[in-house]
Amino acid sequence: MAESDVERTGGPRPPAGQQAASQPIVVAYKSDPVRGAVWSAVFRSELPQASFHMWPEIEAGEEVEYLVAWVAPPDLERVLPNLKVLFSIGAGIDQLNLDAIPPHVTIVRMLDPDLTRGMIEYATFAVLALHRDIPHYVSDQQASRWSYRPLQRAEERRVGIMGLGVLGQALAESLKFFGFPLRGWSASPKTIEGVETFSGPEQLGAFLSGCDILVCLLPLTEDTRGILCHATFEQLPKGARLLNAARGGHLVEDDLIAALASGRVDCAILDVLQSEPPAADHALFKHPRVMITPHIASATLPQAAAQRVCRLIERHRSGLPMEGVIDRRRGY
């Protein structure tokens, strides 16, 4: 079987008619124990033939075939030698050290409609807040100032979205209602109705030059780490606004502070930072033109996520493709 077939299906397909349902299903859960209790209840109801264990209460690690986790144990191959699938409980997998996960282990990221809806709610709110100068008005209120800023039509404010995957495309669809001119940038070419698209490093500058509001929804990879930096900000129109709802690792924080001071960036909304929570005296945390939320743009709802994983395990046991299998070469 070709490597691409293994990646697409999440493992070799068993012989026709062979069902693995009669074999024991052993699942380990390594994350928040309160949410884990919800997962355990869902598994008892939805996949009662499975043996569900809360980490580290696992008597026979060699029996575990499925791991649900935010981060994997550092000695994964030793403690779970027969692991077949690792389910990330987040939409991203940048928190995982892929080099420490054996190549035969299939990694599946969370594709949850609730996760997408939550992110689109937040990102739409944040784009509108940047468009309507809300960071300035919040700062004015805190300083007991009553001020007015001229209103700009949405048709005159260009919004650029970095990352045109499920989230980026859903946000573009949400923003069309307001009439913003939309553009998007991604690693590979995309065609999206109503969105001017750019791709690859050679088109990044052309994309940035037309972004009055820049939104980052990129996956965090070695290619995108630190992409929100001085070089990027210098290619934006003077006075552009920034929303980062992806990962703190995308942003070089000192470069944003400098861009705010020079006026290259007018204001920003950040849901993620390099270190969370930030120090009380963090320059961005206290900046009058920066709004920060504590990584709450979206979250996986445990019941829906557990139900989804139950269905994916059933598909894997039947040799069927699983949605959300990552491509290790691309890092997402």
Image (spheres, rainbow, N blue to C red):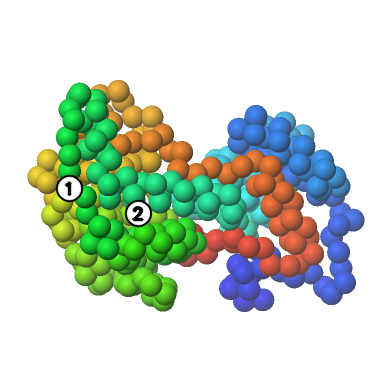
Q: At 32% from the left edge and 62% from the top edge, which residue is drawn?
A: 180
Q: Amino acid at mark 2?
A: Cys
Q: Amino acid at mark 1?
A: Pro
Between 223 and 300, the one lying in front of the other is 300
Q: Is residue 17 above or below residue 148?
A: below
- Crowding around mark 2 (Cα neighbors within 10 Å: few <14, some 14 to 19, many 20+) is many
Residue 135 drawn at (x, y percent) = 26, 38
Most extreme residue toward the left is 262
Q: How many marks?
A: 2
Between 151 and 131, the one lying in front of the other is 151
Residue 206 drawn at (x, y percent) = 21, 70
Most extreme residue toward the right is 22
Q: Is residue 237 above or below residue 265?
A: below
Mark 2 — residue? 216
**Can you tell which quarter of the image residue 4 is in?**
bottom right
**Can you tell which quarter of the image residue 214 is in?**
bottom left
Between 318 and 329, the one lying in front of the other is 318
Q: Is residue 233 above or below residue 206?
A: above
Q: Which callout, 1 or 2, points at the residue further toward the start of the chain?
A: 1
The reply, left or right, for residue 285 in relation to residue 96 is left
Mark 1 — residue? 150
Q: At 12% from the left edge and 46% from the top edge, which residue is drawn?
A: 263
- Crowding around mark 1 (Cα neighbors within 10 Å: few <14, some 14 to 19, many 20+) is few
**Can you tell which quarter of the image residue 215 is in?**
bottom left
